[in-house]
Amino acid sequence: MNHPAEVFKALRADDPPLVADYRLAARLGAGGMGRVYLSHTRGGRPVAIKVVRPELADDPEFRRRFRREVEAARRVRGAYTAELIDADADGVPPWLATLYVPGPSLADAVARRGPLPVSAVLWLVAGVAEALQAIHGEGIVHRDLKPSNVLLAADGPRVIDFGISLASDITSHTVTGSAVGTPQFMAPEQASGGEVTAATDVFALGQTAAFAALGEPLYGDGPSVSVLYRIVHSEPDLSRVPEQLRPIIARCLVADPALRATPAEIVHWCRQRLGRDPGPGPEVWREVMGPELRVPGPVPDPTPVHTMALMAQPRPTGPGEQRARRRRTGLITAAALAAGALVLGGSTWTVLESRDGSGDRTAAGASPVGADASAESDGSSSRSDSEEGSRGSAPDGSKSDGSKSGGAESRESTESGTKGSTSDAPDPSRAIPYPFQWLDEKNSLNIKEPVERKDRKGDIRFVCNDTNCSLESDTSVITMLYGKPGATRDSCRIALRGADSRRLPLAAAAAGSEICVKHPSGDIALLVVQVKSTALPKSGISFLTADMTVWRA
């Protein structure tokens, strides 16, 4: 598994395009804790983003442990570790980012070429032992050191997933009552539910070294119960291991944790055998790593919509088009005059206030003007120029204070026959709440009012098959946000740019997940999941409850 197409998989429909500020470029895989994606820092450096599984994220005990372990892992700095650079334990769902290592795992390398040369195994063991020194130095026990958690970079091995195994594994252990970790690489005390210490990682290092030298697990494969029994009750058979490696592997696999070699002793022993050579040699290591991977580049941010092309439109020539142009000019001019009056009024109030030294706006005779100017200034940043112009002059030719404006603009506006006031138009910045909406396989939701439907003809439907449930729509685009909670209309608009899926699998959704929906009318809806019941998709009792907020176009 060292071909780019096998390593960097295309994102699926249920994969998020964005996690916090990280735009995802490819899917790297999935494990017991969650899914892993390729992304990049703002400077273009590749990172691996791990998104926690929803069932773990819903467990308060997991979040507590995850937060503690992440904070400890941030402090780990070592030449042979993949540094943790960012994380959000309070995200929905939680996630973390480590530096991406452009190389295969030890498991993949052995599957491709078989056992490693002795010199490569010595270099590998020395590097992993040095990584354990850095990890243990921060009070962290890896607990799940194995070939798939050792990556082979051009300058040596890298240990990944340190410091976060405790959070997910303890939760799993509590729920299922089973032993934690990977059976083939457990220590005896770990397999029997005893105390897990730094020496536990040393035992796993011995098994990892034997795997690299043999091309298969030292204690064999088969049912987990059988493998664990052999680890606890049998002496390791090192007869097939190359003779040069037997002493150090035997020191790692001592049954008594107190008698095992320390990571410092392992590093010293391997360096003595390697001599002056820093490693197995570039040719040997390149052969072990396999073909060089070309890492996909960063995904560009969605291209903003520019309106410069509007300036290239032909000038109006017909009488109707000329009248419309004059009408727009009149509206903009009226808006400018109104804004100038507000500024002048505010200035007058300021001068009068400073002249008599009083803070009483009524005494200055300009309190209403000052208040209006302040309110207009506060709201202007979220409105377009055309909206401001429409407030300067009503369609019937009157100003906002009710007086008539003269001139051709007034006559043209009256001739247009437009009725009503722009104050009746919906404010797109106003959020309309629809709390506690219920979705199951018998009803649906509309974006337009009335939002509740007792049939399946609404814009958003809850659909389940034999394996999972999803939200589907015939009219609207749906996407889920990843990162810190608190979505707004603008964050939904950004997330929906370029999105075209009308189906959202709910496998990654959890309580607090935020889902954005865009209706063809331009209305944007935000669903915040409250309760998700999808454990038995076809049971007839699956449902979803969510608070919905709609911003009208």
Image (tube, rainbow, N blue to C red):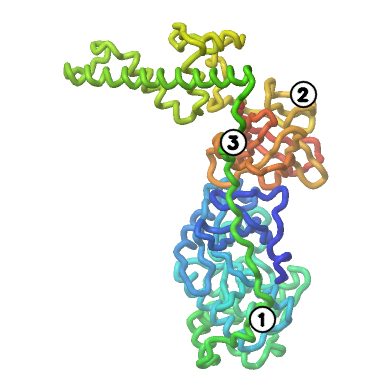
Q: Secondary structure at mark 1?
A: helix
The residue shown at (56%, 15%) is 424
The residue carrying pointer 1 sits among few (fewer than 14), some (14 to 19) or many (20 or more) residues within 10 Å by Cα, namely many
Could you say which is closer to the camera, residue 177 or residue 103?
103
Quadrant in which residue 465 is drawn: top right
The residue shown at (40%, 26%) is 377
Q: Three-letter amino acid code at disc 1?
A: Val
Residue 342 in percent (x, y) is at: 36, 19
Q: Earlier in the sequence, mark 2 or mark 3?
A: 3
Could you say which is closer to the camera, residue 242 or residue 30?
30
Quadrant in which residue 100 is drawn: bottom right
Quadrant showing the C terminus: top right
Quadrant showing the N terminus: bottom right
405 to 259, vertically: above or below: above
Could you say which is closer to the camera, residue 202 or residue 292?
292
Residue wearing tag 3: 312
User: Would residue 58 appear left or right of 85 to someone viewing this image?
Assistant: right
Cβ–Cβ under 8 Å for marks 1 and 3? no
Q: Earlier in the sequence, mark 2 or mark 1?
A: 1
The nearer-to-camera label among 2 and 1 is 1
User: Would residue 335 appear left or right of 320 to someone viewing this image?
Assistant: left
453 to 59, vertically: above or below: above
Q: Secondary structure at mark 3?
A: helix
Q: CA distance from mark 1 to mark 3?
A: 60 Å
Q: CA distance from mark 2 to mark 1?
A: 61 Å
Q: Three-letter amino acid code at disc 3?
A: Ala
Residue wearing tag 1: 288
Q: Three-letter amino acid code at disc 2?
A: Lys
Residue wearing tag 2: 454
The residue carrying pointer 3 sits among few (fewer than 14), some (14 to 19) or many (20 or more) residues within 10 Å by Cα, namely few
